[in-house]
Image: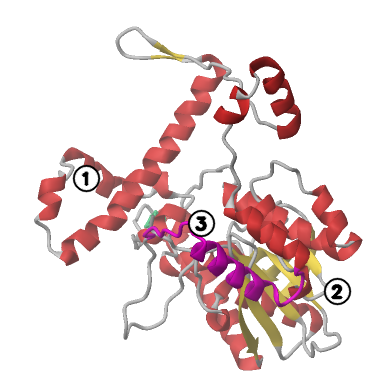
Amino acid sequence: MSNITASRLELVERCPAAPALPAVWTESTDDQVAGTERHRFLQRAGEVGREAAVAEVPADAPWRAQVLGIDTDEIPAGGRYEIAYAYDVAADTAREQGQWVERAYDAGATEVSGTLDLVLPPGEGRPRWTVIDFKGFDEVAPAVRNLQLGFGAVALARVYDLDEVDVAIGYIGHGGDIRWDRATLGAFAIEAHALRIRSLFAAVDRARATLAAGGLPDFSTGTHCRYCAALPFCPAQTAAVRAFLADPPTPDRLALLSDEDAGRVWPLLLAVEEMTKRAKASVRARAELSGLPLPGGERLVPVLVPRRKIIDLDGMLAILREQFGAQADAIVERSLSFESVGELVRQVAPGRGQKKVLDALTAKLLAAKVVQSTSFVQLKTRKAKGDAPAPASGEEAA
Ligand code: SF4
């Protein structure tokens, strides 16, 4: 069975040796869970209406504020969510694997599997089959050359015998606002994506053959390695991390490095951080079962710590007032997240004017000095000016 999936294609393009190594199963990240739940919400909004879909979102779900901010009128109707396909690189054919299969693919030896977030047949105002991939905040390769969308276009073209497919990335912000990146892929573009996928598959086969013969394929290290399931088994990374740990650069030594050398250290720091995170998760899982002996005679033991969440603020205040009188109001912190403002705007101004209303309200709140605006620096990886375009699969750096 092939272990190459559409979501890994951008990584495989950077390092075809990655799927040739064993991979470690990891829990879905919070972002992945939020992404799947977002799709479930959008599907339910189409089936039962927005209000009923909102009622189904758990009150304490971390993704609640984001999905409630989504203007569902912006999402094209009449499509199917979370459809898995398989593209056979040997036969150049594709097949549907099912809906909501939760990445439990049933792929053959020469198939690449992938799940398309939303697939829409042609309809009113939509002349072509359309594939939509929803993303979070992090930028990925543009729709026109995005390999994950390219996989979707190839799959649909083969299944439905199409010459053109519309593709789109919908970036959904923290407040539910959507930014679209759209493209139409014609016959040549679809063939180019199919060729790209077939070439990658062949490159992975060559890497596997080299490993099987006792050799070492080319491992291309970089910031993408932190998304690689084979990271703990990668000879290139383990050698680099071992050398790094044997002589870790101190902050004062780092300060003396040139920008180029500091830039070279960055992917290594990410790899060390990722390996440490995975190692910690593995040891933690063992400790949670029955504890672990620590050097020095102590034990690392699992302890159940109660976590309390207020679900009825008024009810709680009534009891506190009864017990402590007016003091209760003085010490109880009143808090309202800015996402709640977006939620209110969504309720009173549904539809396309929502962003305008939110912008005007934000300006008003800032002018009244009841809201403070701050910003933080987030590092992202971007192509240097003049470089050839290359994939960027959600490759945020820290
Ligand atoms: S960790 Fe990096 S270099 Fe190693 S196999 Fe994965 S992508 Fe390739």
Residue at image point 11% right, 47% down: 252
Q: Secondary structure at mark 2?
A: loop
Name the residue type under label 1: Phe
Q: Which residues are magenta?
A: 349-378
Single out the mark in the foreground, 3 or 2. Answer: 3
Coloration of the structure image: secondary structure
Residue closer to the observer: 191 or 391? 391
Q: Secondary structure at mark 3?
A: loop
Work out whether 375 lies above or below 249. below
Instruction: For residue 312, say whether it is visible.
Output: no
> Which residue is identified by label 2?
78
> Which residue is identified by label 1?
244
Q: Earlier in the sequence, mark 2 or mark 1?
A: 2
Q: Is-magenta flag for residue 363? A: yes
Name the residue type under label 3: Val
In 3D space, how far apart are the residues under numbered discs 1 and 3 (Cα atoms)? 45 Å
Name the residue type under label 2: Gly
Q: Is-magenta flag for residue 141? A: no
- Ligand 1 - quadrant of the structure image: bottom left
Could you classify mark 3 by the number of other residues whose Cα lies within 10 Å: few (under 14), some (14-19), or many (20 or more)? few
Work out whether 390 lies above or below 53. below
Instruction: For residue 381, say whether it is visible.
Output: yes
> Which residue is identified by label 3?
371
